[in-house]
Amino acid sequence: DERVTITAQTNNVNMQNFSDQNLTGMNSGGAGTSVTKSLGINYNNKIGKKIDINGSYSFNENDNSAEHNTCRQYGLAADSGQIYNEFNNANNNSYSHRLYLRINYNIDSMNSLLIDPQLSLQKSYSHSSLFGSTTQAGDTLNKTVNNNQANTLGYMFYGNILFRHRFKKQGRTFSINLNTSNNHNNGLSFLNAQNIFYANAAASDTLNQKTNTLWNNWNILANATYTEPLGKNGQLQLQYNYTTQPGNSIRNTDNFSLPDGAYTIPDSALSNTFSSNNTMQKLGGSYQYNAKKIIASIGLYYQVAELYNNQSMPYSSTVDKTFSNFLPVASFQYKISDKRNLHVNYTANTMSPSVTQLQNVINNANPLQLTTGNPELKQPYSHNIMMRYSAIGKNSNMFFATVNGTYTQNVISNKSIIADSNTLLNGNILLPKGSQLNMPVNINGAWSVYANLTYGIPVHIIKSNLNLTLYSGITNTPGIINEIINNSENKNVGLGLTISSNINENIDFTFTSNASYNATINSINTAVSANYFNESSYLTFNWVLPGAFVFNTQMNYQTNSGLSDGYNQNFLLWNVGFGKKLFKKRQGDIRLTVYDLLKQNNSIQHSVTESYISDVRSNILQRYLMLTFTYNIRNFHK
C-alpha cells in the first residue's frame, strides 16, 4: 500500500522528464537546445480502508538557447504589403519547484471528500538579442537592434475541495466543489535599443530603460450540483456556479538619466496601474434520457457576468459592464446497432478577457512593433457543434466521420495600426513610417468548419492494419488593419495513410504519411496571400535478430513549399540503433543509437493570423550518439 518513487536525470538532448509549467511568461516554444536537470519524489499510501494519499515534489532546471529567424507578410490594403524580418538569439534559464498533494477520503458508503492542493514556484533569467527590419516594395523602412534582460519570479497556488453525497434513492446525488488558484508574477527587465526610422530621422532614438512589473490574479470558484432521477430512464441535473477573479497589475518604466547615472526618469506612456474584479454567476439545469439505443440531453443555463476594471495611472478611468447570456447545451447519441453509432453535440460558452488584454499600457519590448491592452473588451460568445459517426464492419473494417463547427461573436482579435507615414496616436504615441501598434479588440465574423474521414482495413498478408484519413477545414479570422476589416481565410485539405504491423514478436514496423495543402487569402490585399504544401512521412522498424541482437531505425522525411524565401527546406531525420539483449531471460539491453544520422534536423513553423502570414525557422538539436543500458526488473519480492 505504501510506495516511494525517486526519479532523477540530467541531459543536454532536450529530454524533459516533468512538465515544466511556464509561470514567468518566458519560454522558447520548444525550439533550440536545452540542458535539463530534474529530481522527482512521489509518495503513495493507503491508510486503512478509507484514505488514499498521493504526494509529490519535483525540481526542474532548464537552460535553453534558441535562435529564431522570422518572416511576416502583412495584409496591407496597398499594392505591396510590408514584410518584417527578425533574427532573435535568446537564452533562458529557469528553476522550478512543484509540490502536489491529493487526499481521497471515503467517509462512508454515501459520502466522500477529495482535497487536492498544489504549489509551484519558478524563477527565470533571460537574455535576448534581437535584430528586426521592415521593408516595403524593396525599400527599408526601419531597423532595430536591441538587447533585453529580465529576471522574473512567479508562483502559482491551486486548491480544490470536492464533497460528494449519495442519497438512498438511486441516482439522487449532491456535490459541492470549492476551487481557488492564485498566480503571482514579479519581474525586472532592462531594454537597450537602437532604432532607425528612415522616413523620419528625428524619430530615430536610443532607448535605455528599466521596467518593474507585478501582477497578481486570483480565481475563486464555488459550484453546487444536484441530480434527481425522473422516471425509469431520465435524470435531472441542477447546477449553480459562482466565480470571482480579482486581479491587479502594475508596470513602472524609467528611463536612464546620464546626469544621475541611474534610472530616474519616469516614462508615463509605458507605465500603468490597473486592477480588475470579474464575477460570474451561472444557474440552470439539464435533463438526460438514457435508453437502450438513445442517450440524449438538453439543458439551459443563465449567466450574468460583471467586468469591473479600474485604472489609476497614468490617468484614472473605470469600466463597469454587465453581460447576461443564455447558454444552451444539447447532446444526442444514437446506437444504430452494436457496431454503428451517431453522436451530435452542441454547446455555447463565453470567455472573459485576461488582465493583460485589458491593461492599457504600451509594451515596447520590440520598438518597431508596440503592443497595448484594451479596457473596453467584451466577452466573446461561442457556438460549437460536433457530429460524429462510427461504424465497424464484419471484417474488422472501421469507418469514422467527424464534423466540427464554431462561430464566435465578439471574438477577441487583433487591431493593427501600421504606419504608412509618420503618425501621432492619442497625442503622445509616435509611430514612424513602417512601425506598428497592436491591440486586442472585439469583432464579429470568426468561424471555422472542420471535417475528418477515416477508413481502416486489415491487411492479412502482412499482418497489418491500413488506415486512410481525409480531412479538410476552413477558418475565417477577422482582424482590423489600419481601420479596415481584414478577413484572413485559411483553407486546408489533407490526406493521411498509416500502415501498422506486428508480424511476430521479432519484427514490427509502422509507416505513416501525411500530405496537406493550405491556401490563405487576405480580403484587403489578395497579393499578400499564400499557398503552402507540407508532406511528412515517418517509418519506424524494429527487428530482433538471431543471437538476441536488436536493430531499430526511424526515418522522418519533411518537405515544404510555398513558404517565404529561404524557408522552403526539405530534410530527412534518420535515427539508427543497434544493440543486444543480455542475460538468460533477456532482462538486459545494451544499445548504441545515432540520432539524426545525416545531420539534417530542422524546425520550421508556418502560421496564419488575422494580420499576417508568418514563417519561423529555429535552431534545433542535431546529430548525436547515445549508449543506453536497460535492465528490466520483472518481479518485486513481497
Image (cartoon, grey):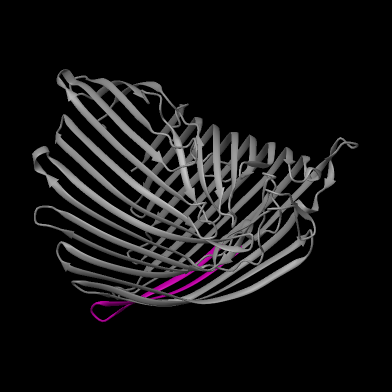
Horizontal placement of 92 versus 58: left or right? right
In the rendered image, residue 308, in percent from the top left (x then y), is placed at 66, 69
Q: Which residue of the protein is positioned furthest toward the right in this rendering?
A: 259
* Tag count: 0
Residue toward you, 261 or 629: 261
**Who is closer to the viewer here, 360 or 142?**
142
Q: Quadrant of the N terminus?
A: top left
Residue for point 18% across, 54% down: 398
Which secondary structure is most common in the magenta stretch? strand
In the rendered image, residue 155 lying in the magenta stretch gets the answer no
Q: Position of residue 55 (x, y in %)?
A: 45, 45
Question: What stretch of residues is rendered in magenta?
Answer: 220-245
- Seen at 67% across and 38% down, the residue is 150
Query: In terms of depth relative to the viewer, which is nearer, 195 or 179?
Result: 195
Above-or-below relation of 105 to 368? below
Extreme residue toward the top, this view? 547
